[in-house]
Image (cartoon, rainbow, N blue to C red):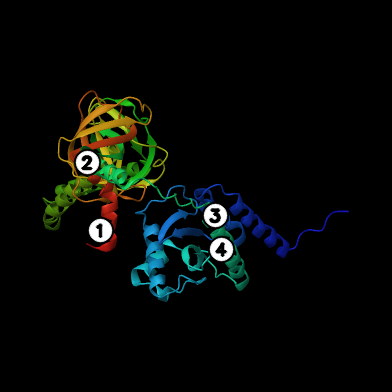
Amino acid sequence: MNAPLPSTAERVFALFLGLEQQARKAGNTEQLAFAMVNDGQALFGFRHAALLIAGRVQALTGISVVEAHAPFVAFVERATSALLKHGRLDEGHSIDPAQLDEQARADMNDLSAPHAYWLPLKSRNGETFGGLWLARDTPFSEAEQSLLRQLADTYAHAWLALQPRKPWRMRWPRKKLLAVAAALSLLLLIPVRQSVLAPAEVVPLGGRVVAAPLDGVIAEFLVKPNQSVAAGDRLVRFEATSLKAQADVAERALGVAEAELKANSQRAFADAESSARLDLLAARVEQKRAERDYARQLLARSEVRAERSGIAVFADAERLTGKPVQTGERLMQIADPSQAELRIELPVGDAVALQPGAEVALFLDSDPLNRHEAQLERSAYEAQTTAAGQLAYRLDARFVDTPPRVGLRGTAKLFGDRAPLAYYLLRRPLAAARQSLGF
């Protein structure tokens, strides 16, 4: 006989026991944090979860490394701060948008799900040291909330068990402690050169941008990425069926206008009305000729040709083939392979004072053992959002020797002025403290 299928309650109970088992198997807080924000999706169906410890996001659903300046991270931390002001961090409850400020409510509509639940994590003495922000498209039922509160006790117990123990008190003599403190003070005053790391890419220098000359649909890319081209070579072909039809119609309209002008010119000797219409018909002929010439120009633009020699720099032809583009939209870039520069995206949190001519060292991902020297030329005054979603300053540097191949990416190390070792080590903590305390 076949075994009876488990009921819904039995499946829920099995999944719940599995979550507790995963929490107990975690070898460190990183593994436990990953399990807390990911493993519960099968049981509770949340869209995303965020683990906060001491008011800071430590883990997110589906994210391996948390970016401190990401919009969603800032929203969750701001929302929990609002809950702290209302005294609602010590109890598990569904989030009421009225408890949040105006900016947090707007971010919740844009970045989170409609229904969120706050699940606190408490220590043995009942103090809340963190919690889970759970969000999904439907409200959490009473049964689910009961399971979440029970699961929170397991998670809190496992988290506290994995915390490192406090170190034992050093029992050195007082004189020795003073000597060590003096040596550390002198060590912290040693001037060191400031340096930061940032992602970088080798880009063309002085390349010619190839833009769409008309509104239309791209039929075919006639070159491949990084292919060498000469001046006059065909690069892109637009769909020209409608353009050819427009040119033919304009040509026939011009022929009709010219025939009508010729006929009225012959009758003008005997017909005063025909003579009076000659200027109008001549203007119409010029209009039709201009329309014909414009249609021919559009037809000629359906094939984009290279204006200079170089290599065709673009990402993927399939992304644009068969899709409509607008006039002026960038298609590719024609660049000289021997002329390249380094483009750097310096995160806002790592920014230091950099002067033009500062030393830059590039380590390519494809060749991390070799160093390429460069010098900083330009730096942007305003930070912009990168493709990764973080704020960064754009910096341009020129290579001292032969530049690498265009398109290669790597990590750039930028060197600034010298500063005491204490400032070098405490620069970011001091900046974070100033932002938090406002002094």
What amino acid is at disc 2?
Leu
SS category of the residue bearing label 2 = helix
SS category of the residue bearing label 4 = helix
What amino acid is at disc 3?
Ala
What amino acid is at disc 4?
Ala
In this rendering, the label closer to the viewer, 4 or 2 = 2
Image spot of residue 176 (x, y percent): 31, 43
- Is tag 1's residue or tag 3's residue first in the polypeptide sequence? 3
Image spot of residue 74 (x, y percent): 36, 60
Q: Give the residue at mark 4.
A: 152
SS category of the residue bearing label 1 = helix
Residues marked 1 and 4 touching at CB (< 8 Å): no
Marks 1/4: CA–CA distance = 34 Å
Q: Where, quadrant-wise, is the C terminus in this rendering? A: bottom left
Image spot of residue 359 (x, y percent): 20, 33
In this rendering, the label closer to the viewer, 3 or 2 = 2
User: How many residues crowd around disc 2 within 10 Å: few (fewer than 14), some, or many (20 or more)?
Assistant: few
Report the front residue among 347 and 428. Answer: 428
In this rendering, the label closer to the viewer, 4 or 3 = 3
Report the front residue among 116 and 84. Answer: 84
Residues marked 1 and 2 touching at CB (< 8 Å): no
- Examine the image and state in which quarter residue 214 appears: top left
What amino acid is at disc 1?
Arg
Which numbered dot is residue 161? 3
Identify the residue at the far top of this view.
402
Q: Give the residue at mark 2.
A: 186
User: How many residues crowd around disc 3 within 10 Å: few (fewer than 14), some, or many (20 or more)?
Assistant: few
- Is tag 1's residue or tag 2's residue first in the polypeptide sequence? 2
